[in-house]
């Protein structure tokens, strides 16, 4: 007899375990999909309601603008002398012609004048097949309101034309203010309704009784949103507001604050009031797209979740495999990285040593080049005064005239002064900067005072050269932090260069400008000379470069000035002016900026 084995196989247990987990995951997916759908539905619904609110506000603006476009016209016509005469019985036919022209120009359906009984005595459509002329509208509310002295407004189906329109009426008063007639206009709104229909959206307006008076869907017009009681229906019939329309209820049900059903379809519903007319403007938008987008969000999230779970399982297995490989490769990579880093450090150290040697060699070469220039310039500049001194000394040995000797001594003294000046300029390049002595300390100084000091030394040169000097400076101090004497030396150099540049010009003018621009102090010297010519500022700043004749200068003025400006954390600029001449400018930081820095 065969014995049955009742032991459960492990694979069967594992399969049952997996099926249970699949069922649990499906249940969790459904349970999580419901709140996700509700969340997406609420978001898209609020978004659609906001859009609908914007749309209904836009439709309200177009409706109000259409109704108020000609609101002023009855008021103006009621005070027209022609209208007043016609109300009294004069020239009524002429007024009809006049009103016809007005209606044609304003695109109104009709303009008409009624006497105190409501009989139309003049009308713009007097020559039309269907005319308001000789029709009595004393039963209309707008006529009754105007006859009592106030403005009348009314929407309804025309009693004569059977066409809907908006009526506005004003009383026509005599000299003592008594109403002698009523002037009214009829504004057709068919074009507005057509634009609503062409827009492809669901929008309609209801009056205070809940009657749809305007609609993008013609089948909704003259239906009611709520039931109208018998007395109110009788009043509407007496006014003949909607003609013979039955005013049947609309297939309309309100669900909550923002949802309605209309003709079996469900819509989001937003409204806005038009208080002046007692109307309400309704805008409907289909809820179908909101459901579709919400379902799409759930589907997309489900797909993404599934993909992420698949990727997560794959990455988990990959991480285990990669971790095993990485643990073996990390030590090898670390050793290789350390070796590479050591090589890079050694290469950088050698490169820095080579760079330092190159800098030293360049500095020595620059010093030798400067020494060569200096030797040539000193030889040239000192050769002439020394030769002249030798000639004066030789002539003094043979001259017994005291006056002649005194004159030669004076000339020798001038040559000695010139040699001393040359050495003083060369001595500037031996200084590393401000020495810290009393005459070279940094103080808070006013650029206007710098010009005042320089002008005292330059006045004689400017007058002898016949130069027209102008100055532009602010009324308040232009404070910088620096050395007064050295900045004054820069300004003197710039002005003397300008004087020398105008030797061959007929019109000689120098303009000194002191100003604050973009938070920096600016002192400029402009002349009417020949300009910079073919030279750049960098070339003119090189020591021993001069454009003057031999013996008139060593070409150190701009080089010295540039170094002084650099010591003050500023910069020296130069450019040729379009009208001729050159403009040199010192650009310095203000004292407050330098202190902050």
Image (cartoon, rainbow, N blue to C red):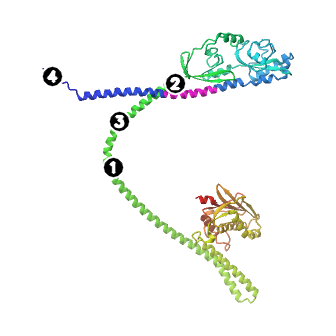
- Separation (CA) of disc 3 from disc 2: 36 Å
Point out which mark residue 289 bears: 2
- Separation (CA) of disc 1 from disc 4: 59 Å
Point out which mark residue 533 bears: none
Q: Is residue 54 magenta?
A: yes
Image vertical order of residue 543 relative to residue 11, above or below: below
Residue denoted by label 4: 3
Please tell me in which quadrant of the rendered image residue 515 appears. bottom right
Label 1 SS: helix
Q: 108 and 487: which one is in front?
A: 487
**Measuring 29% from the left and 28% from the top, which residue is drawn there?**
17
Mark 2 is surrounded, within 10 Å at the Cα level, by few (under 14), some (14 to 19) or many (20 or more) other residues, namely few
Q: What is the span of residues highlighted in magenta in the rendered image?
A: 40-58
- Separation (CA) of disc 3 from disc 4: 43 Å
- Separation (CA) of disc 1 from disc 2: 56 Å
Name the mark nearer the viewer: 3 or 4.
4
Q: Look at the numbered discs 1 and 3 and tell me whether their residues touch, using CB distance below 8 Å.
A: no
Q: Quadrant of the C terminus?
A: bottom right
Residue denoted by label 3: 313
Please tell me in which quadrant of the rendered image residue 588 appears. bottom right
Residue denoted by label 1: 330
């Amino acid at each position: 007899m065969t014995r049955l084995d009742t032991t459960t196989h492990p694979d069967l247990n594992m399969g049952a375990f997996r099926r249970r987990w699949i069922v649990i995951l499906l249940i969790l997916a459904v349970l999580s999909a419901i709140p996700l759908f509700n969340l997406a539905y609420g978001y898209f619904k609020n978004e659609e309601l906001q859009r609908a609110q914007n749309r209904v506000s836009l439709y309200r603006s177009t409706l109000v603008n259409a109704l108020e476009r000609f609101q002023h016209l009855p008021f103006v016509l009621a005070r027209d002398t022609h209208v007043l005469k016609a109300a009294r019985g004069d020239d009524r036919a002429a007024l009809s012609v006049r009103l016809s022209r007005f209606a044609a120009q304003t695109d109104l359906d009709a303009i008409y004048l009624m006497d105190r009984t409501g009989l139309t005595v003049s009308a713009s459509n007097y020559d039309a097949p269907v005319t308001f002329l000789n029709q009595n509208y004393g039963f209309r509310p707008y006529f009754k309101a105007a006859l009592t002295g106030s403005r009348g407004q009314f929407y309804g189906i025309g009693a004569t034309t059977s066409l809907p329109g908006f009526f506005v009426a004003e009383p026509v008063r005599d000299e003592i203010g008594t109403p002698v007639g009523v002037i009214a206009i009829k504004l057709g709104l068919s074009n507005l309704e057509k634009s609503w229909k062409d827009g492809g959206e669901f929008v309609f307006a209801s009056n205070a009784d809940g009657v749809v008076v305007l609609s993008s869907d013609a089948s909704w017009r003259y239906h009611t949103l709520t039931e109208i009681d018998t007395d109110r229906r009788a009043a509407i019939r007496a006014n003949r507001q909607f003609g013979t329309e039955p005013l049947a209820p609309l297939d309309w049900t309100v669900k909550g604050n923002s949802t309605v059903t209309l003709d079996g379809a469900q819509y989001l519903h937003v409204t806005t009031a038009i208080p002046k007319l007692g109307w309400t403007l309704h805008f409907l938008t289909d809820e179908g797209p909101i459901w579709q987008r919400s379902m799409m969000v759930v589907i997309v999230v489900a797909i993404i979740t599934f993909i992420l779970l698949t990727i997560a399982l794959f990455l988990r297995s990959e991480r285990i495999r990669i971790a095993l490989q990485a643990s073996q490769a990390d030590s090898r990579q670390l050793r290789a990285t350390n070796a590479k880093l050591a090589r890079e450090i050694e290469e950088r150290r050698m490169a820095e040593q080579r760079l330092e040697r190159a800098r030293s060699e360049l500095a020595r070469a620059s010093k030798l080049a400067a020494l060569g220039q200096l030797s040539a310039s000193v030889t040239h500049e000192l050769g002439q005064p020394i030769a002249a001194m030798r000639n004066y000394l030789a002539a003094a040995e043979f001259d017994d005239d005291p006056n002649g000797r005194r004159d030669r001594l004076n000339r020798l003294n001038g040559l000695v002064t010139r040699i001393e000046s040359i050495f003083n300029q060369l001595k500037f390049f031996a200084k590393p900067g401000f020495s810290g002595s009393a005459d070279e300390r940094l103080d808070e100084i006013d650029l206007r005072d710098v010009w005042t000091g320089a002008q005292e030394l330059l006045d004689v040169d400017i007058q002898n050269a016949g130069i027209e000097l102008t100055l532009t400076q602010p009324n308040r101090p232009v404070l910088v932090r620096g050395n007064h004497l050295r900045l004054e030396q820069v300004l003197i150099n710039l002005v003397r260069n300008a004087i020398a540049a105008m030797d061959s010009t007929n019109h000689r003018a120098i303009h000194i400008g002191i100003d604050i621009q973009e938070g920096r102090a600016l002192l400029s010297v402009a002349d009417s000379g020949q300009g910079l010519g073919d030279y750049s500022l960098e070339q003119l700043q090189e020591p021993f470069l001069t454009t003057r004749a031999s013996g008139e200068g060593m070409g150190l003025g701009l080089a010295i000035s540039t170094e002084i400006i650099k010591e003050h954390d500023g910069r020296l600029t130069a450019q040729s002016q379009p009208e001729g001449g050159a403009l040199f400018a010192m650009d310095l930081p203000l004292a407050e900026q330098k202190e902050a820095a």
